Amino acid sequence: MKFSEKLRQEADPIYEAIFKHPFVQGIAEGSVPKEALIHYVKQDYEYLTAFCRIYGMAVSKCENREEMSFFQNQIGFILHEEIHPHNNFCEAAGVRYEDLQKAPLAPTAHHYTKHMLEAAAGGTLGETLTALAPCPWTYWEIGSRLMKEVDPSPNHPFYDWITFYADKEVSKITNTFKKLIDECAEKAGEREREQMCENFLVSARLEHRFWTMAYEQETWEMVNSSLNQGRN
Ligand SMILES: Cc1ncc(CO)c(N)n1
């Protein structure tokens, strides 16, 4: 069994819980509370900004231009394409995207971005890739499964979101992640493979928590308004 298949198998209960999550089921049913959509976009905008920076760190670990090119394309994908699903949520919530940008990170988004950052700062390319992979991989599975199970019509409120993540582009991205992870795992020793696995499972769990964070509008306790303003 390929290393990436083993990771997916170990994470299966987490993937299943993500699909059953009330936020994700709300996307299926076309009914997510407005406050949850807003909190999600605020946090995800910051999360994806951090993701771009981490892709930049991953470039410094690449051994060839083909790998570099993948990460470069991924930065473009986040900056120019992944704004569409955010816009879909903003339209559904009746708010302007610009008004949701530069929010401080809530605890789970903070935890998740710092987890990926740590993997990239101190880890190998394989350890970095496995911390990043649940991001496209869980969304591809959510998108393609909603496409099959809901088969949304264009007037479904989350038609754009679902079709975006069910698109073959996201499948291609996920497959490239798997291929690169398998190549790294081949060359890695036992200890590195264990770390790769741990990074993957922690990120998959944080994917689940990210949905809960948005659904419950998680914030820090005892945040005063001045701390709540600018970037962190
Ligand atoms: C938290 C999170 N995970 C995955 C994706 C998909 O890119 C996203 N936009 N946000």
Image (cartoon, rainbow, N blue to C red):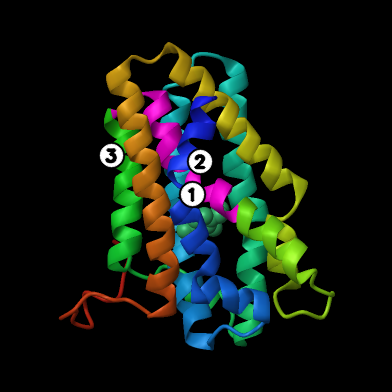
> Which of the 4 image quarters holds residue 90?
bottom right
Count neighbours of disc 2 (C-alpha within 10 A) and say few if under 14, some if 14 to 19, many if 20 or more. Answer: many
Residue at 21 percent of width and 74 percent of height: 227
Q: x, y percentage for residue 139?
A: 59, 55
Label 3 vs 2, first from the N-terminus: 2
Note whether residue 48 is visible: no
Looking at the rendering, the stretch of residues picked out in magenta corresponds to: 123-139
Q: x, y percentage for residue 28?
A: 66, 74
Q: x, y percentage for residue 117?
A: 33, 42
| Residue 130 to residue 44: above or below | above
Judging from the image, what secondary structure is the residue with disc 2 in?
A: helix
Whether pointer 1 and pointer 2 mark residues with C-beta atoms closer than 8 Å, the reply is yes
Residue most extreme to the right: 154
Type of the residue with mark 1? Asp
Residue most extreme to the left: 222
> Which of the 4 image quarters holds residue 143?
bottom right
**In the image, residue 125 lies in the stretch drawn in magenta:** yes
Whether pointer 3 and pointer 1 mark residues with C-beta atoms closer than 8 Å, the reply is no
Whether pointer 3 and pointer 2 mark residues with C-beta atoms closer than 8 Å, the reply is no
Q: Quadrant of the C terminus?
A: bottom left
Q: Is mark 3 within 8 Å of ligand 1?
A: no
Residue marked by disc 3: 118
Residue marked by disc 2: 8
Residue at 27 percent of width and 29 percent of height: 122
Judging from the image, what secondary structure is the residue with disc 3 in?
A: helix
**In the image, residue 135 lies in the stretch drawn in magenta:** yes
Image mark for residue 12: 1
Label 3 vs 1, first from the N-terminus: 1
Residue at 23 percent of width and 74 percent of height: 220
